[in-house]
Amino acid sequence: MAETYPINIWINEERFEKLQQAGLASMAKEKMAGLKVLPVPTNEEQKDKILKLFPMAKFDSATTKSIELLPREVKDRIFDLIIQKKTLDVIDDFIKMVEEERK
Amino acid sequence: MDNIGHGGKEIVERILPRDEAVKKVEELKQKGAPEIEVRRQIATEVIDIAYGFFCPLEGFMGKADVDGVCKNMRLADGTVWSIPIVFDISDEELSQKGIKEGTEVLLTYMGNPMALFEVSEVFTYDKQEMAQNVYGTTEEKHPGVKRTYAYKDKFLGGKITLLNPPKINPVFEPFFIPPLEMRKRFQEKGWKRVVAHQTRNVPHTGHEWLMKGAWFQTYGELPIDKPYVGVLVNAIIGEKRVGDYIDEAIVLAHDMLRKAGYFGEHNHMTSITFWDMRYAGPREAVFHAALRTNLGLTHHMYGRDHAGVGTYYGPYDAHNLLMSIQDDLRITPTFSMNWLYCPHCGEVTYEGLCNHKDEWQKYSGTLIRSIIIDGVKPPRLIMRPEVFDVVMECAEKYGFGSPFVTEEYLEKRTPVFTIEPLK
Ligand SMILES: [Zn+2]
């Protein structure tokens, strides 16, 4: 499988409640001594598109190999798509959505 | 008292007592001496020169020093120095104000008199050559190169004397401890060795353990009947970019590590130095060594890719360069690997110690910023709750609601220092 680069959506109480309501609580992973995170995978092409659409974001190539520093609202939208579609495979839809809006 | 700084030179403050300074300004005004209003970067470097942070420099560099620094990483007298400290000026301003060799110039900042600049040299220097030698590249996307290209056409060299010391704003005031004062503080503490932690970040536990690890490294063979070793956090305060932590949060969060007991008065102190990072990687590492030598430190911690940017420098380039000039330095580098969280060990541990490599969870400053942006409080093993709380408090008090620099912060923040009218 090709390498994937996660967008880490960190789960606060509000997001955890939504996950539970959608029956998706088991998707969240435990990390670093008590954090919950949804690592949303992106492939190389998706990663590059996300970084281009959101220039404030940063790919942490040295330490974590993940896309970080996306604004909270952006992650909220990705998160809502996940809840709605009950899958982590939402990045193509998300990119399409943003591209449509910006046309 | 031993006030020997970098290059084996004595640290001498170049600051006139207030009454003499007032007279000097009057004299300059009477004879119609030219005045130059300097930008923030130059003002901070004037302060650094005057207080001895840049010892043995007594002013802005002349051509021989710049050339030596660029080509051999040494001043004209042979002292190791890695980054040009230059005063740039446009041809237009130069001729308009009639500045030439021998001119006494009054430097002003925020409209008030700041320093006397005894211009001894007017010169040009090829900026591409400067960039290539100092940064190893001529690409403008390197922030240091960009800064170099932004310099105006000419450079002025000459001695600086501070006439009007800066007023440091209340948050930062206790942390502005110039070299001579710093050395006194170390003596009072009874520290025989002090190790520097360079920072522009709010500390997570990876940073805390870097400091603790360096404290062990530095302690070495010293006796343990009393605390003989301290960690000095020296936060670099300079140009800010949107998305950085606000300065207030960086300084107060580091200080909180001591206040909240993760360190104590006996082994930890927080301080600031004014400097715009050049991101020169290995050369910046050497510059930091000189700076911290002047502050009276005996050791300096260096992690991977110290003060680097992008992929311009290899992770150990700085270490190798430092080792190659160790005989010319009066400070000993301590090299560190990363600290990380190992769920198997159930603790924050060191790359060089734990062998559960497949289980390691590395965390970076960037990752922690992402967690905070998402409105999540990191676990105490990753970021101390007191640190998190003070960062959030700073967001409210100083950051216009955000712990990160915003356009609003850049526009409305209280400056770290001001130059007040001289009376
Ligand atoms: Zn382990």
Image (cartoon, rainbow, N blue to C red):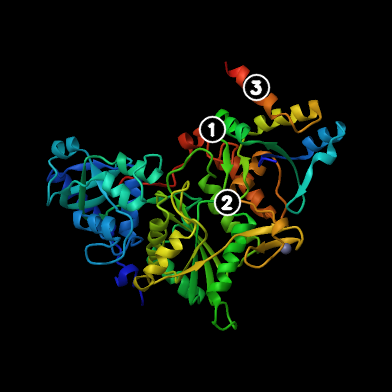
Quadrant for the N terminus of chain B in the image: bottom left
Q: Secondary structure at mark 2?
A: loop
Q: Chain of mark 1?
A: A
Residue A19, by quadrant, is top right
Q: Position of residue B421 (x, y in %)?
A: 31, 45
Q: Identify the residue position indicated by label 1 in the image.
A: A55
Mark 1 residue type: Pro
Whether label 3 touches label 2, CB < 8 Å: no
How many marks overall? 3
Q: Position of residue B231 (x, y in %)?
A: 53, 67
**Sequence-earlier tag: 3 or 1:** 1
Q: Position of residue B5 (x, y in %)?
A: 34, 69
Depth check, mark 1 against mark 2: the one in front is 1
Mark 3 residue type: Lys
User: Which residue extends farthest front?
Assistant: A1
Q: Chain of mark 2?
A: B
Q: Identify the residue position indicated by label 3 in the image.
A: A96
- Identify the mark at residue B202; answer none if there is no mark: 2
Residue at horizontal 36%, vertical 73%?
Answer: B327
Q: Both on one chain, marks 1 and 2?
A: no
- What's the CA distance linking mark 3 and mark 2? 36 Å
Residue at horizontal 55%, vertical 68%?
Answer: B214
